[in-house]
Amino acid sequence: MELAYSDSELAFRDEIREWLTANVPTHPLPPPYTAEGVAERREWEKVLYAAGYAALHWPREYGGGGADFMQQMLFDEEYHRAGAPQRLNRLALGLVGPTIIEFGTAEQKRRWLPEMLSCDELWCQGFSEPGAGSDLSAVRTRAVADGDDFVLNGQKIWTSLSAFADWMFALVRTDPGQTRHRGLTYIVLPMDSAGIELRPIRQLHGEPGFSEVFFTDVRVPAENVIGEVGDGWRVAMATLGYERGTGLGNHVRLSKDVRQLVELAERRGVADDPAWRDEIASRFAEAELFRWYMQHIASQLAAGIGVGFRSSLVKLYWSELDSRIQETALQILGPYAELADPPACANGTEFHRGYWHARASRIFAGTNEIQRNIIGERLLGLPREPR
């Protein structure tokens, strides 16, 4: 594991840091689940695109930056450190875009990739269903071949950005005679198709952000299938691999949250309490461990060694650490944690939001129970869970 950056990597970091300092919006952008927030964040995405930073991890031949893994990590670190806005079209750039690059036809790449990069088209994900969340192979949304189209009927749930998305990438069942992983197909469909109905879902913190999506005789061209009909499970697993992925710069966000724990303890007057100092020091050590592990992952990727099932380790670790950080914050807040608008001396509004999001992070991208099974069975060679 190489712990020192090369001169060229340091120069790249300085370039990114200088650009972000000059271009990151100085005011907070509206939330991404509002029309105003989507509009302003789309403009920010276009600024990134014009500078060549929309998708550094994509190959150059598809409009990306062709960056190596160390450069990707440096960019992610600096992006989080600069407090830049959360990426709007991350489902396109991080999930379905790389999937189309891997499995799509030349025409599909020409049609969809440029609009993802420029953020002219937004994407949402149609995997989870009421009876198929952690068990994705239980997908029941049907797609029946009819001439040059497939006709979709069924339902998706927990669909982020669906109210503003132009396209959805979805996993559907095209062969009802097959069960579990077989008979599934990966397809993309325009969200303005006739027969699509959205029903917003209000979250525990009182804000919208997800929708239920219902399909009633929705016609989708067969040419929108990614990969082969019936081979959707393999394509979807590639997408989930990108989702769990490396998250090379995520450790910076967690480290910033730990620093905010220190500030919160100072405001609450408990910064000198040995018990709280020990608790915060534990979160700091855990965040540092994650930082070193992600540098190890980046150095291995640079050497051509894939992440494989270790992506489950990464997802499990950061989501559990995120939860512990947020829980520590609410414990420091004490009785003020029950207030939606606490006084200035205990202002922890962001920790309220972070707490609920951290609980969700144990579920999305594959529940942590599923990740533990993968780690035990695939990495440690333990006996399979009884089924």
Image (cartoon, rainbow, N blue to C red):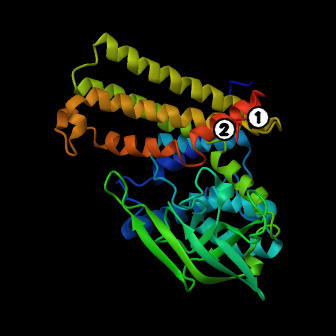
Name the quarter where the C terminus is drawn.
top right
Q: Quadrant of residue 4?
A: top right
Residue 114 falls in image quadrant: bottom right
Q: Tell whether label 1 touches label 2 (CB within 8 Å).
A: yes
Q: Is residue 291 above or below residue 223?
A: above
Name the residue furthest bottom.
Answer: 147
Which residue is drawn at the image coordinates 32% and 42% (left, top)? 352
Please give the count of numbered marks on the rendered protein: 2
- Residue 379 visible in the snapshot: yes
Q: Dot 1 corresponds to which residue? A: 378
Q: In this picture, is 139 found above or below 370?
A: below
Residue 36 appears left or right of 10: left
Q: On the rendered structure, is 260 left or right of 106?
A: left
Q: Please, is residue 18 above or below residue 143 in the view? A: above
Residue at point 54%, 84% (across, down): 195
| Percent coordinates x, y for residue 186 in the rendering | 72, 66
Which residue is situated farthest in the top direction here? 274
Q: Earlier in the sequence, mark 2 or mark 1?
A: 2
The residue to which callout 2 is attached is 312
Instruction: Give SS at disc 1.
Output: helix
Query: What is the quadrant of residue 184 in the picture?
Result: bottom right
Separation (CA) of disc 2 from disc 1: 10 Å
Which residue type carries mark 2?
Ser
Classify 10 Å Cα crowding around label 2: few (below 14), some (14-19), many (20 and above).
many
Q: Nearer the viewer, residue 366 or 95?
A: 366
Residue 317 image point, x, y percent: 57, 32
Which residue is found at the position 34% from the left and 39% from the top? 351
